[in-house]
Amino acid sequence: MNSHVNEMRARDGTVGKALDVLDTVAGYGRPVRFGELLEGSPHPKATLYRLLQTLTNQGMLAYDESSHTYSLGLRLVRLAHVAWQHSSLAPVARPFLDALSARVGETIHLAQLDEGQVLYVDKRNAQRPVEMFSAAGKVGPGYCTGVGKAMIAHLAPAERARAIAQQSFYRHTAHTLTDPERFAAELDRIVAEGVAFDREEHEPGIICIAAPIVAPDGRVLGALSITTSLQNRTLEDLTGLRPDLIDTAKRIAEAAASWQFPG
Amino acid sequence: MNSHVNEMRARDGTVGKALDVLDTVAGYGRPVRFGELLEGSPHPKATLYRLLQTLTNQGMLAYDESSHTYSLGLRLVRLAHVAWQHSSLAPVARPFLDALSARVGETIHLAQLDEGQVLYVDKRNAQRPVEMFSAAGKVGPGYCTGVGKAMIAHLAPAERARAIAQQSFYRHTAHTLTDPERFAAELDRIVAEGVAFDREEHEPGIICIAAPIVAPDGRVLGALSITTSLQNRTLEDLTGLRPDLIDTAKRIAEAAASWQFPG
DNA sequence: TGGGCGGTTCCGAATAATGAAACTAGTTTC
DNA sequence: GAAACTAGTTTCATTATTCGGAACCGCCCA
């Protein structure tokens, strides 16, 4: 699914390899045995073994004696807490999300771009209170989500090309855009309109409207979306929310700008 | 504050050093410049420089061109999402926390032990919906919190000794236990009683009752606490919640056990 | 124009990573 | 119950990488 990320990132010496292993373990999404990791690993047994030892010793992985399996360690959770607080828009955007959520009553996502993929960093849910990490830290595709398209559309040309090259263009639904050419055209349309729509491109029956969060200097900081299902609302309903969405995105960008520099 | 953790963990070759740098950056809690990191770093300029390059290139750090500062990167948030899901009690405990929260209406914490410190992995708040990462990933002291004492008390002797040695015993309030001897006695009392109390030992006016979550094989998985302020409730009130708390902790332990092995 | 400071690059020496192979422990097969 | 097998761990001579002192760059300020 996202193993190509591994291939891309390696070649930073030992540290790169170690972090690569971390990604691989994460990719399984469950405790994994030494043998499983070995096949599919570019490293010989002893090397992989030492990497796992080191990472475990460092608390980045957790080894379960009884089941002989490795999982990601708690040290990551600890680090991520700090990372989320100062490398993400979420702390700045929080009050704006709260307000927007109260006004529109639909699911709201705040996302950032990471290696061409969408990384959700905060969320407001209409019904249930809030799902914790299930939102923050989750990744999604860039080419078939509202937030992904909104962000990629507003990148500088070179970055945009790179981001397009990083997409898998897997067909999730009948509406998914799977052709890079047509995708690029869609991006131009998005820049012209200022917002991106997800027209059931990722999940059937799910639609959204998304706006980019762009810094004064033009850098894309993230994106904001309002998601709903066709059972509740129509695309026209979402279009009606456009002014509020764009306004909120702009306010977040301003807040981020004045937060960035005084630090 | 927690720099001793750094000292302890290094000496795992290059990877150890790199992760150490990550901790250091996290310790600042804000974007930090190269020079700041250099003083206080055991590495010469060139070495530190290369470590930062590697980590940045790997997405573990983010470098801001304009302010020349490093912060923790988004890749950590991504990894932590997975780590939280399968290396923490939180997913298993979630329904039990929801139920307990609904019954008692006070703030609830779920924590695990990491290097002698308390790592909060989930939270239910009485008033406001839920504060996201502000709970999950946050660390606290082991010797003056309910959850910390409950967990350390139920460790095997050798581990308990190690955990005690890892405490700073900084005096937060007039009630903080700062003597290792008396702390050990408190731990024995906690084992006998089955629950730990925080009697304003961390923050004035804040009290809590905590129970450990212990696996069938005796391993301490985590702890659960109900926190309140002396303005609202008394220690006696909390004692009344003891049966419910202990019962919930036991149920979580059972759920974790039956989740651990089928994996 | 020139000094100072933060950041970057070089390169021989020192060190740590490598990986084939041997070993051990637990498990299945006959 | 022994032998073959499987999965995981350790060893060690070789090799490649990291190390770090020193030189270099370039920007800001005087």
Image (cartoon, coloured by chain):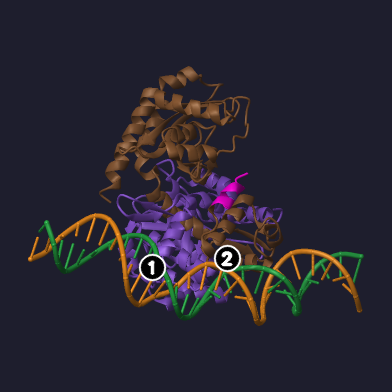
Chain colours: A purple, B brown, C orange, D green
Please say if D27 is above or below B191.
below
**Residue holding disc 1:** A46
Where is residue B192 shown, x and y percent of the image? Answer: 40, 24
Q: Amino acid at mark 2?
A: Thr
Q: Is residue B5 magenta?
A: yes
Q: Position of residue A246 (x, y in %)?
A: 56, 57
Residue A122 appears in view: no
Determine whether the residue tagged by mark 2 lies in a helix, strand or loop: helix
Magenta-colored span = B1-8
Instruction: Look at the picture and state if B35 lies above or below B222.
Output: below
Q: Nearer the viewer, mark 2 or mark 1?
A: 1
* Label 2 to label 1: alpha-carbon separation: 28 Å
Camera-side residue of A158 and C13: C13
**Secondary structure of residue under mark 1:** helix
**Front-most of residues A235 and B11:** B11
Tag 1: amino acid: Ala
- Residue B5 in the image: above or below residue A182: above
Callout 2: few (<14), some (14-19), or many (20+) C-alpha neighbours within 10 Å? Answer: some
Q: Which quadrant of the view contains residue A95? A: top right
Main secondary structure type of the part rendered in magenta: helix
User: Can you say whether B16 is above or below B106 in the image?
Assistant: below
Residue A257 lies in the magenta-colored region: no
Residue B47 visible in this rendered orientation of the protein: yes
Q: Residue at x 40, y 58 (%)?
A: A207
